[in-house]
Image: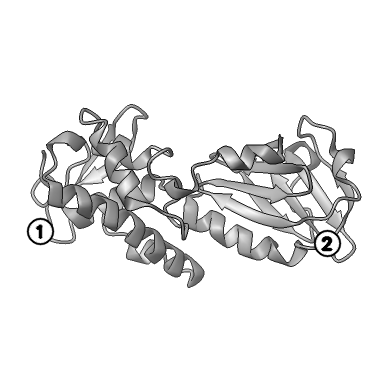
Amino acid sequence: MPEGPSILLMKESLQEFVGRKVTEASGNAKFEKKALVGKTLLDIRTFGKQTYLVFHAVSVRIHLLMFGSYSINEQTKPDKSLRLSLKFKSGSMYFYTCSVKLVEAEFLTTIDWEADIMSEDWNPKKAEKKLKAKPEMMVCDALMNQDIFSGVGNIIKNEVLFRIGVQPESKTGNLPPKKLKELIKEARNYSFDFLKWKREFVLKKHWLVHTKSTCPKCGQKLIKKQTGIGKRRSFYCEKDQKFY
């Protein structure tokens, strides 16, 4: 599943269409695509793993889920995978195998933009308050909780926990205050490192534990385990990451 930094890169690549009018809309998303024809794309906003194509009175919410993708100016996948195609005089955008929904403009006002890990509106104090309200939550679940860290995915989770030396099944309420603040700080720091490395096409080269078998610090074999409510893959070192 694409994480927040990748969604931000998608937004940047679609930015050329802002201010332009839709001339044709199609795809198998379950809403009336003709409603978008003739409308001008006013803005593109992202919230974690979600993208909003903003038009007057409505927005199109796109979530790439596990296997979603997009392309620009050329349809690269078959019609059965095409959820939405928007064509403009200057080009076109295509979204495949993803969730595409039409939402009213007012919906954007209900979003807690301060929870977006990559947003200028990111509020670490609010994140800390939310974490303290869930002391029994495992840190692996906390980092993946989109109401707290919108945009964080499994890669960021594993790498952040290694950076701060915390095992994924530790409880948030057991973390010392300093370590809790470190968790919040590094979630944002790593997300921007992710973005930088993704732009340079070197992201995987910088993975320290995600999908790895040995610890880069001590050389001990890493634990690979499905952890938390979501049973997502965790990679961690029992020696260099403390269980709280």
Q: Which image quadrant: the C terminus?
A: top left
Residue at point 28% right, 51% down?
184
Name above or below for residue 5 compared with residue 24. Answer: below
- What type is the residue that disc 2 sits on? Arg
Residue furthest bottom as drawn? 200
Rate crowding at label 1 as few (under 14), some (14 to 19) or many (20 or more) other CA atoms within 10 Å.
few
Coordinates of residue 158 in the picture (x, y in percent): 29, 48
Rate crowding at label 2 as few (under 14), some (14 to 19) or many (20 or more) other CA atoms within 10 Å.
some
* Color scheme of the displayed model: one colour
Q: Secondary structure at mark 2?
A: loop
- Earlier along the polypeptide chain: callout 1 or callout 2? 2
Looking at the image, residue 107 sits to the left or right of residue 142; the answer is right
Coordinates of residue 191 in the picture (x, y in percent): 39, 58
> What label sits on residue 52 in the rendered view?
none
Distance between mark 1 and mark 2 Cα atoms: 54 Å
Instruction: Say if residue 226 shows up in the picture.
Output: yes
- What type is the residue that disc 1 sits on? Cys
Residue wearing tag 2: 20
- Which of the two discs, 1 and 2, sits closer to the camera? 2
Coordinates of residue 175 in the picture (x, y in percent): 14, 42
Q: Quadrant of residue 235?
A: top left
Q: Nearer the viewer, residue 121 or 243?
A: 121
Residue at point 85% right, 54% down?
87
> What label sits on residue 218 in the rendered view?
1
Q: Secondary structure at mark 1?
A: loop
Residue at point 33% right, 42% down?
143
Q: Quadrant of residue 127?
A: top left
